[in-house]
Image (spheres, rainbow, N blue to C red):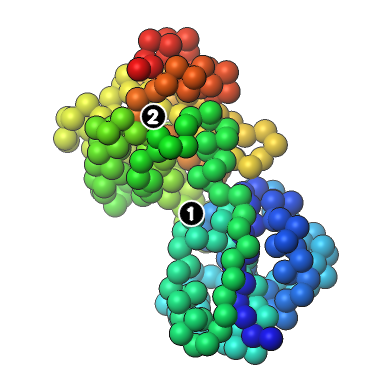
Amino acid sequence: MKELVFVGLGLNDEYGITLKGLEELKTADTIFMETYTSRMPDFNLQHLEELCNKKIQFITRQTLEEENGKQILQASRIGKTVFLVPGDPFIATTHVTLRIDAQKNGVPTRIVHGISIMSAIVSLSGLHNYKFGKTVTVPFPETLAQTPYNVIAQNKKLGLHTLCLLDLREPENRYLTINQAIKTLQNVEQQKQQNIVTQDTIALGVARAGNSQPILKADFVKNLVDFDFGMPPYSLIFPGDLHFMEVEALIAFASAPVEFKRLFK
């Protein structure tokens, strides 16, 4: 039976896949996986292959974007094809074009969701989910992009939190760090001077969400810029208006300084 099933892998290792996702792998004719949209620090391909008793083929960004997923679409026209994606298939990145092309070619599609950075951030930090505004990606500094700064500014005006996903180039093993992201935003602050990312702005850095020992640190930017978050992957949050329970959570879970208690509204 021809079909294309998008399966989320979760955030850290092969244990993040759901039982339903694992069952999809066991009954698949062909399995593809991409690793360029997010880093899974403890992922073990051999172990996952042993769990599902199938071979898994890696797909590059070029295959998906420049060749329009031709290899995956060809396989899905013949039999059941599973496409493994870090996190949740359509959250941290979008493979909507591939899904649309499959449907246009008469190939049914389904989704098996996985743990995403969006839900993990809320769970880890204690920040309220309904108070997050638009999410933005902070690119490497050479792009000179001002969009992340502008999004943070827009969200702050509405009292909303901003989740910043940090750029990565998996083939180069290059990951934008929290420290670099802050410095990039500070450079834009120097140009625009809107008091959005100043020394006294509060922020929360998160490293290795989904790991059994993630790193969370909330503090003022002047202190976070030199904080050692260890290995990737990374995320950065700029809170908007804080509820007193959110402040308590940041102090309890993210080692925020007690001075944060004067910040809630």
Q: Which mark is residue 265?
A: none
**Residue 225: quarter of image:** top left
Residue 48, horizontal then vertical, whole percent? 76, 61
Estimate the spatial distance between the alpha carbons at disc 2 and disc 1, rounded to whole Å.
20 Å
Please tell me which residue is depicted at 72% across the width and 69% down the height of the picture: 24
Q: Secondary structure at mark 2?
A: loop
The correct choice, above or below, for 146 with respect to 196 in the image is below
Q: Position of residue 73 (x, y in %)?
A: 55, 83
Residue at 48% across, 48% down: 175
Name which of mark 2 and mark 1 comes first in the sequence: 1
Q: Which mark is residue 92?
A: 1
Apparent side of residue 26 relative to residue 34 in the rendered image (left or right): right
Quadrant position of the N terminus in the picture? bottom right
**For mark 2, does the 10 Å Cα neighbourhood hold few (<14), some (14 to 19), or many (20 or more) residues?**
many
**Label 1 crowd (10 A; few <14 / some 14-19 / many >=20):** some
Left or right: 240 in relation to 231: left
Q: Which residue is at a point 35% across and 25% down the rendered structure image?
A: 241
Q: Tell me the quarter of the image containing the C terminus.
A: top left
Asked if residue 75 shows in the view, the reply is no
Look at label 1 and name its amino acid. Answer: Ala
Instruction: Kindly identify the amino acid type of the residue bearing the numbered disc 2.
Output: Pro
| Depth order, front residue of 61/109 | 109
Please tell me which residue lies in front, 191 or 251: 251
Query: In this figure, which residue is indicated by the disc labeled 2?
Result: 239
- Above or below for 199 versus 262: below
What residue lies at 53% left-to-right and 30% top-to-bottom?
125
Q: Quadrant of residue 151?
A: top left
For label 1, the SS is loop
> Image quarter for residue 89?
bottom right
Q: Residue 137 appears at what percent x and percent y?
A: 38, 48
Count of labels shown?
Answer: 2
- Measured as percent of width and height from the top left, residue 170 is found at 52, 57
